[in-house]
Image (cartoon, grey):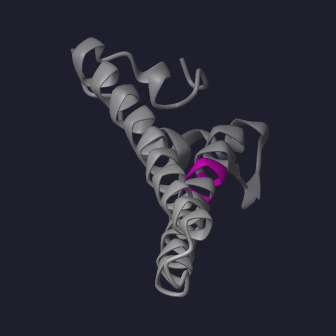
Amino acid sequence: MPQFQWDEFLKINCVENGVATLSCIPAVFLNIINALLMFVGITSLVFIIFSGYKYMHSAGDPKVLESARNTLIFAIVGLLLVLFSFFIRNLIFEVTQVPCIKTFGFGC
């Protein structure tokens, strides 16, 4: 079974006479997904740093320590959920070789 080449599909079908067509919508979705993934990563990093700051300035207050601990746990769990969802999607694609999984149903 030939490997689906997403980049080649976009070069052939996405632009006509220098103007983007409706077949560019999958590329827009992929760019949005990539931007959201970067946003989640940066947000998680900020919350991890913020929880460390709260922990260092807690002065032994149990409520602040618990709050810092919860912030750290939730930031790490959120980041892991997003990363594992992409891992599972890519794993399913590698096992089934169905191109619609990576292109969100477009181009099939």
**Looking at the image, is 99 positioned above or below residue 1?**
below
Please name whichever residue, 78 or 98, is drawn nearer the observer in this view of the structure: 78
**Looking at the image, is 93 positioned above or below residue 34?**
above
**Could you tell me how many numbered marks the image carries?**
0
Q: Residue at x 52, y 31 (%)?
A: 103
Q: Residue at x 52, y 83 (%)?
A: 53
Q: In the rendered view, does 63 fall on the left or right side of 99?
A: right
Please name whichever residue, 72 or 32, is drawn nearer the observer in this view of the structure: 72
Whether the magenta-drawn stretch holds residue 34 is answered as yes
Q: Residue at x 55, y 81 (%)?
A: 58
Q: Which residues are magenta?
A: 31-35
| Image coordinates for residue 68, horizontal then vertical, percent | 54, 66
| Image coordinates for residue 73, horizontal then vertical, percent | 46, 52
Please name whichever residue, 104 or 9, is drawn nearer the observer in this view of the structure: 104
Q: Residue at x 61, y 63 (%)?
A: 63
Name the main secondary structure of what is drawn in magenta: helix
| Image coordinates for residue 64, horizontal then vertical, percent | 60, 69
| Image coordinates for residue 44, horizontal then vertical, percent | 53, 63
Residue extending farthest front: 61
Which quadrant would residue 54 be assigned to in this image?
bottom right
Whether the magenta-drawn stretch holds residue 98 is answered as no
Please name whichever residue, 42 or 22, is drawn nearer the observer in this view of the structure: 42
Quadrant the N terminus occupies: top left
